[in-house]
């Protein structure tokens, strides 16, 4: 059985067929739902604004928000990994001192 299959995701009233791994289906469906939710939020927030925005503008804002959140998670993970390395080195030094 092929571990990949095609799903159709609907985002911003457009249908997007994607070939994905079966195990990733829920992740993709949730991502599409989250994108639609954020698009509606931006459209509601900027309703009546003096500078009319297009769907592309809302999609760009949604993409910027999603990617900035991802980058924030990556930065926090890097800080965490750095702190773990530092604590591991301190523990190694402590243990070496105890053996002497």
Image (spheres, helix red, strand yellow):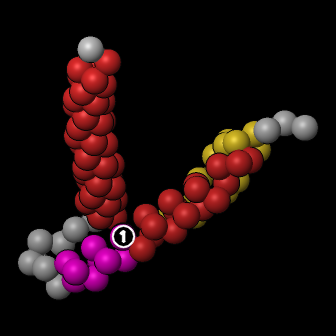
Q: Residue at x 36, y 70 (%)?
A: 38
Query: Which residue does the numbered mark 1 point to in the structure image?
Result: 39
Task: Give the camera-side residue of 37 and 53.
Answer: 37
**Residue 99: which quarter of the image?**
top left
Residue 43 in magenta?
yes
Left or right: residue 89 versus residue 7 is left
Predominant secondary structure, magenta span: helix
Task: Give the camera-side residue of 57 and 34.
Answer: 34
Task: From the top left corner, tell me how far across and down residue 98 is, in percent.
Answer: 28, 24
**Residue 60: which quarter of the image?**
bottom left
Task: From the top left corner, tell me how far across and down residue 34 is, in percent.
Answer: 45, 67
Left or right: residue 43 versus residue 9 is left
Q: Residue at x 65, y 49 (%)?
A: 24
For the magenta stretch, what is the residue range?
Answer: 38-47
Q: Residue at x 58, y 56 (%)?
A: 27
Q: Residue at x 28, y 42 (%)?
A: 80
């Amino acid at each position: 059985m092929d571990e990949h299959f095609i799903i159709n995701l609907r985002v911003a009233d457009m249908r997007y067929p994607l070939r994905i791994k079966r195990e990733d289906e829920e992740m993709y469906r949730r991502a599409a739902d989250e994108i639609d939710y954020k698009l509606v939020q931006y459209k509601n927030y900027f309703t009546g604004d003096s500078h009319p925005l297009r769907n592309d503008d809302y999609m760009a804002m949604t993409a910027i928000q999603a990617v900035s959140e991802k980058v924030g998670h990556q930065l926090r993970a890097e800080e965490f990994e750095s702190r773990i390395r530092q604590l591991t080195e301190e523990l190694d030094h402590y243990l070496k001192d105890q053996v002497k």
